[in-house]
Image (tube, helix red, strand yellow):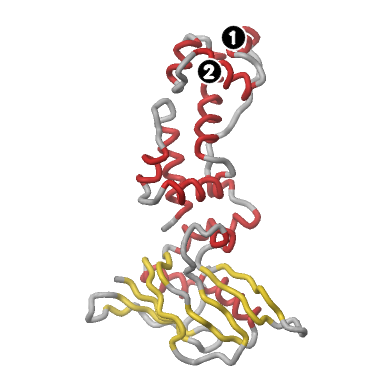
Amino acid sequence: MDWVTDIQSTVNYIEDHIKDKVTLEELAGSIYTSTFYYQKMFTLLCNCTVSEYIRNRRLTLAGYEVIDAVTSIMDLAIDYQYETNESFTRAFTRFHGITPSEARKTQANLQVFSRIDIKSNLSGGKGLMSKLSERGYVVRETGAVYHTMDMDKTLEWFQKILGWYGQIESRDGEGLGLYGCVNHIPMEMEALHIAPFTGIHLFKGEPEERVVGFMLITGVDNLYKFIKLNGWNKVTEVKEEVWGGKTCSVTTIDGCVLTFFEV
């Protein structure tokens, strides 16, 4: 699931229906997820809750119309889904620091909460999440155990070649990694427990030159293109299997084999 694109689509929907009644169930259902996961992801990517976004955007746009002095304040309250003129005035005053009538009279400069463009807003650690939409593939199921003697080097390979994320949790006295994880989603998202773990556990040990992971994904053709574009040639071409699926295997920097399949 491409969370960045999907959440952005619901932001766009909110904007297109800003004067309509928009429910959480409607938004979550439009991207085929639960309201619980939807709220978690919206807050993570937009830095505000769904209700905060809708309220702040309505009050911003209402502010423009108040200043224009074309529509009555009573009608604006109704247009922006407020049950009474009083409730609209209270919300408007909390947001702008001035009542609608005072703003109209003085033509005051009002607060602005801009429309969110998630990809433009992502920065720092969240900036990594923009890669989710660039890769073109999503891991659906895994949980493999992977041994490596140089965990830092292995982690760098996963990040550079597969576009994954990861961290080393434990090191020995010499600073060598003892345990870590790599995941196809950012570790910040995995830590929220908004989805089952779909990464790989890394342990210090002699690498096994065999298939160490057999992973269900969506977008196996895109995976192959992504790996080749990143300059890694130890990857098999996508093969159509007799059982109806497609497979693609990549040999890692440690000589281990990761096999991806799509049905």
Q: Position of residue 29 (x, y in %)?
A: 35, 45
In the rendered view, tell whether residue 106 sits above or below residue 200. Answer: above
In the rendered view, tell whether residue 175 sits above or below residue 21. Answer: below
Which residue is at a point 52% across and 21% down the rendered structure image? Answer: 62
The three-letter code of the residue at mark 1 reads Ser
Say which label, 2 or 1, has the lower sequence index.
2
Which residue is at a point 43% across and 68% down the rendered structure image? Answer: 139
Q: Position of residue 100 (x, y in %)?
A: 58, 13
Q: Which residue is mark 2?
A: 87
Q: Secondary structure at mark 1?
A: helix
Q: Position of residue 91 (x, y in %)?
A: 57, 22
The three-letter code of the residue at mark 2 reads Ser
Q: Residue furthest top?
A: 105
Report how many numbered discs are placed on residues in the image.
Answer: 2
Q: Which residue is mark 1?
A: 101
Q: Looking at the figure, which quarter contains the N terminus?
A: bottom left
- Quadrant assignment, res 59: top right
- Cα separation, mark 2 vs mark 1, equals 14 Å
- Disc 2 crowd, CA 10 A, few/some/many (<14, 14-19, 20+): few
